[in-house]
Every structure is written in C-alpha cells, then in structure tokens.
Image (tube, grey):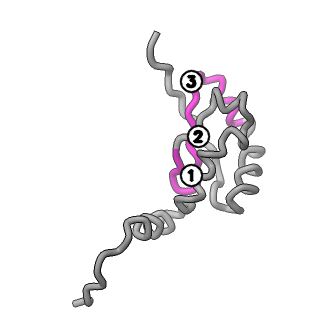
Amino acid sequence: MKPDRGPVPLRWSLERLLAGMGAPQIDDTMMIIDQWPEIVGARLAERIEAVAVSGSELLVAVHDPAWASQVAWLEAQLLERIEALVGPGKITSVRARVQPREGP
C-alpha cells in the first residue's frame, strides 16, 4: 500500500495528464488562444477562431467551408508563428471544423 501524500493540486494532475497525451501545457494552450489575433491577424481572427488543442493538434472553428480551405493553405505559416510563441513541437498541425452560424 502506498502512503497517502495528501491532496494534489488539480492543475498538477491536469499537466501530467496532458503531458502523457503529448499535449502542450495549459499555459501554452491558453497563450495560443489568447494571442490568436496576433498569430493570424485581426481580420482573419474574425473568421477563424482557435477553440482547443487535442494532443498536438490545434482545432479552429470557421463558419464557411471556404475558410477551412484557407486554414489548410495557411497551416505552415500558422505553425511557424505558434512555434515562435510556445516553442517547437508542441503544435504540429491545425485542423479546421465548420460550425454554421447560429441565428438568422
């Protein structure tokens, strides 16, 4: 039986879990999402939204399939900018998913 070490901070547990999955640290993920307008530019940030990280893949949402194609064309440039921000190898691909706009 292992001795009880007491409570463990939730953030520490999440960081270990993410590292085991090959995902970037929580701070890196938040930095990418928070600085997304600087990564893609203000005009593109209105049309392409960084929403999550899955493993080493950045997931972005777009409202039109044409913008999903644009993300594919920009992927190498986006990865360069993300690498400059959080370091090499943390994000290795960018995948767009189309989410239709809600409302009229």
Tell me the kind of residue under disc 3. His
Whole-angstrom CA distance, mark 3 to mark 1, is 22 Å
**Residue placed under numbered mark 3 in the picture:** 63
**Residue placed under numbered mark 2 in the picture:** 50
Tell me the kind of residue under disc 2. Ala
In the image, residue 5 above or below residue 102: below
**Residue 14's spot in the image, x, y percent?**
42, 64
Q: Which mark is residue 30?
A: 1
In the image, residue 44 above or below residue 100: below
Tell me the kind of residue under disc 1. Met
* Magenta range: 52-72
Closer to viewer: mark 3 or mark 1 = 1
Closer to viewer: mark 3 or mark 2 = 2
Q: What secondary structure is marked by label 2? A: strand
**Residue 13's spot in the image, x, y percent?**
40, 69
Whole-angstrom CA distance, mark 2 to mark 1, is 10 Å
Q: In the picture, which quadrant includes the N terminus?
A: bottom left
Farthest top residue in view: 104
Count of numbered labels shown in the rendering: 3
**Residue 75's spot in the image, x, y percent?**
71, 42
Q: What secondary structure is marked by label 3? A: loop
